[in-house]
Amino acid sequence: MAKEATKKASVSEETIAATRLAGGKRNAEVQKGIDRNKAYAVEEAVRLVKARAKAKFDETIEVAMNLGVDPKHADQMVRGVCNLPNGSGRTARVAVFARGAKAEEAKAAGADVVGAEDLVDIVSKGTINFDRCIATPDMMGLVGRLGKVLGPRGLMPNPRVGTVTMDVVNAVKGAKGGSVEFRVEKAGIVHAGVGKASFTEQALVENIKAFVDAVSKAKPAGSKGTYIKKVSVSSTMGPGLKIETGTVVSATPAA
């Protein structure tokens, strides 16, 4: 009996240690059936991630990509915008710097904040009540003064990602939920939310493929060797799963 009790105590201690290592009971539960070293086909990865998104809120499904670039070099910067075929599931607050007819078009398209000099003055004082920022080309002389305020937040309008444009209607509609911007970080990682756990598996797979394709097409001239090193998917509160690169891009970008 003593030996059996000792064995049960030992097993209990091992279980507790394993649970702590996994980050708690909830994390231990969601980790079951997951091989952190395996690269899954995108469809299987999405299915596993969705099945483990059990939070009380609609978790965001996120994609992270490790790229073979060094952002310290200007010719290796990766930046762009991706129009997700099934939307992001998130409605962003959009500000538009425009005058006259373009300002009216922006308001009609659903922009949350529209203005010119008045908006520049508000933002320069540190009041930023928006998530995305768009400007018409003629406004960039004024908006350029806000670089120190908008730049660190990743909100500075840029023609490369379609946020400096005369087509404010489509820019606003895209920013309101159908598109996501991406920019490589210091460690060579690009990530973005590509939907919600409530989306269907097919919708998420389509969004993931669209995002990876957009990043693939944004390969800079200075990138040498393997461009897309790793792709992974996760939910806000769930584990990350590696994705087989071949299942999310039609062809690996040339070295």
Image: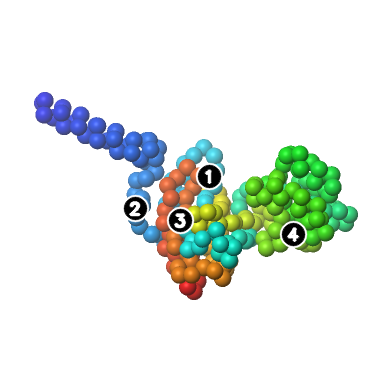
Q: Amino acid at mark 4?
A: Val
Instruction: Label 4, secondary structure: give it.
Output: loop
The amino acid marked with disc number 2 is Asp
The Cα–Cα distance between marks 1 and 3, rounded to whole angstroms, is 16 Å
Residue under pointer 1 = 59
Residue 110 screen position, x and y as percent: 77, 50
The kind of secondary structure element at disc 2 is loop
In this view, the mark in front (3 or 2): 3
| Relative side of 254 to 13, left or right | right
Sequence-first disc among 2 and 1 = 2
Disc 2 crowd rating (10 Å Cα; few below 14, some 14-19, many 20+) is few
Residue 223 in percent (x, y) is at 52, 68
Q: Between marks 4 and 1, how big is the CA–CA gap?
A: 31 Å
User: What is the spatial separation of the Cα atoms under label 2 and label 4, in whole angstroms?
Assistant: 44 Å
x 56%, y 70%: residue: 221
Earlier sequence position, callout 4 versus callout 3: 4
Q: What type is the residue that disc 3 sits on?
A: Ser
Badge 4 density bin: few <14, some 14–19, many ≥20, Cα 10 Å: many
Considering every residue shown, the one lying at the far front of the view is 73
Q: What amino acid does circle 1 point to?
A: Glu
- Is residue 32 something one can see in this rendering? yes
Q: In which quadrant of the rendered image does the N terminus lie?
A: top left
Q: Earlier in the sequence, mark 3 or mark 2?
A: 2
For mark 4, what is the residue? 164
Q: Which residue is mark 3?
A: 232
